Image (cartoon, helix red, strand yellow):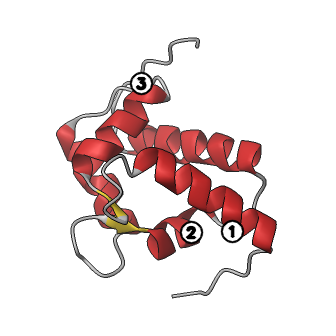
Amino acid sequence: VMEVQLSDTELSELKDIFAMFDKDNSGSIDIVELESMVASLGINASKEDLNDMIAEADIDQSGTIEFDEFKTLIGPTSRKKSLLRITSTLSNFSTKTGTVLSHEPN
């Protein structure tokens, strides 16, 4: 696992983004929280897609995405770029798996 070097600001921003998705403050993102996150980005994903997304990011195979896994997945970027990168990552992932995405304007 490659350690991602982040500035204090970047780390703080990523923690804020992670906290938005970690609705129950458990310290990890589970499939229900991931589904909510994906839906909030206007992306329709199947349970299979969501499980695949978790599996791809879930280095320790716990079935959830912890902050360190999230940090590695997203990497060092500004908050806005991180959100765009999350959207892009999810869109690309769903496109790879053949899922048709529905993007709704906010």
What kind of residue is marked 3?
A: Leu
Element under disc 3: loop
Q: Which residue is mark 3?
A: 101
The amino acid sitting under disc 1 is: Leu
Name which residue lies at 80% across and 74% down: 7
Q: Secondary structure at mark 1?
A: helix
User: CA separation, marks 1 and 2?
Assistant: 8 Å
| Residue 71: mark in rendering | 2
Question: In this image, 96 relative to 55: left or right?
Answer: right
For the residues labelled 3 and 2, say whether their Cβ atoms are less than 8 Å apart.
no
Residue 76 visible, this angle = no
Give the camera-side residue of 46 and 80.
80
Quarter occupied by the C terminus: top right
In the image, what residue occupies the spot 78% across and 53% down? 78
Eyeballing the image, is 81 above or below 26?
above
User: What separation in Å lies between label 3 and label 2 (alpha carbons)?
Assistant: 25 Å
The reply to whether the C-beta atoms of the residues labelled 1 and 2 are less than 8 Å apart is yes
Visible residue check, residue 90: yes
The crowding category of the residue bearing disc 3, from other C-alpha atoms within 10 Å (few below 14, some 14 to 19, many at least 20), is some
The residue that mark 1 highlights is: 11
Residue in view at x 51 percent, y 55 percent: 18
